[in-house]
């Protein structure tokens, strides 16, 4: 009977730990609540169609904002179409980040603008 009594709390603990491990570890965890956050976005485009040396890597939105001291609570991305002609960009996307409203000006300094957020 004692084993059965211990199995329920142990199962609950295991479930809690597994859910915690599945959460996005790269994002800041102290979410201040919906009234204190907002989405920002920036379009990134680069590379060049038909260029064999094209190695454009878009910036990591989270790292970019965190380098300015901005906490990021969620991110998203919407890929945009590009033309297939030589000279057109090989990458284009809107990068979204959910940040504290107090950090909007800092984000705007590096090109982000207020946003409705990614389509979910």
Image (cartoon, rainbow, N blue to C red):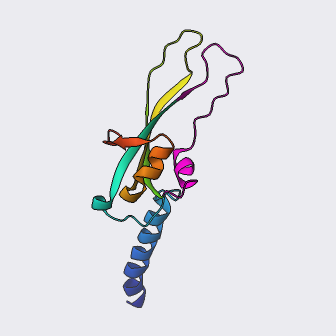
Quarter-wise, where is residue 115 in the image? top left
Residue at 39% of width from left, 64% of height from top? 31
Is 42 drawn above or below residue 20 in the view shown? above
The N terminus, quarter of image: bottom left
Residue at 42% of width from left, 70% of height from top? 16
Magenta extent = 45-70
Q: Nearer the viewer, residue 51 or 103?
A: 103
Q: Nearer the viewer, residue 120 or 8?
A: 120
Residue 103 coordinates in the image, percent (x, y): 43, 56
Is 66 drawn above or below residue 113 in the view shown? below
The C terminus, quarter of image: top left
Quarter-wise, where is residue 41 in the image? top left
Horizontal placement of 105 versus 64: left or right?
A: left
Asked if the magenta segment contains residue 105, the reply would be no
Horizontal placement of 52 versus 89: left or right?
A: right
Quarter-wise, where is residue 29 in the image? bottom left
Is 4 drawn above or below residue 120 in the view shown? below
Residue most extreme to the top = 85
Asked if the magenta segment contains residue 57, the reply would be yes
Residue 107 coordinates in the image, percent (x, y): 46, 48
């Amino acid at each position: 009977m004692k084993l059965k009594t211990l199995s329920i709390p142990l199962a609950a603990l295991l479930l809690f730990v597994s859910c915690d491990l599945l959460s996005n570890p790269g994002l800041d965890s102290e979410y201040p609540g919906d009234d204190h956050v907002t989405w920002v976005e920036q379009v990134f485009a680069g590379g060049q169609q038909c260029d064999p040396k094209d190695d454009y890597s878009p910036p990591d939105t989270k790292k970019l904002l965190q380098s300015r001291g901005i906490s990021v609570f969620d991110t998203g991305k919407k890929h945009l179409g590009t033309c297939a002609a030589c000279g057109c960009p090989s990458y284009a996307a809107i990068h979204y980040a959910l940040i504290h409203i107090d950090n909007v000006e800092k984000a705007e300094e590096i090109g982000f603008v207020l946003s409705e957020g990614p389509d979910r």
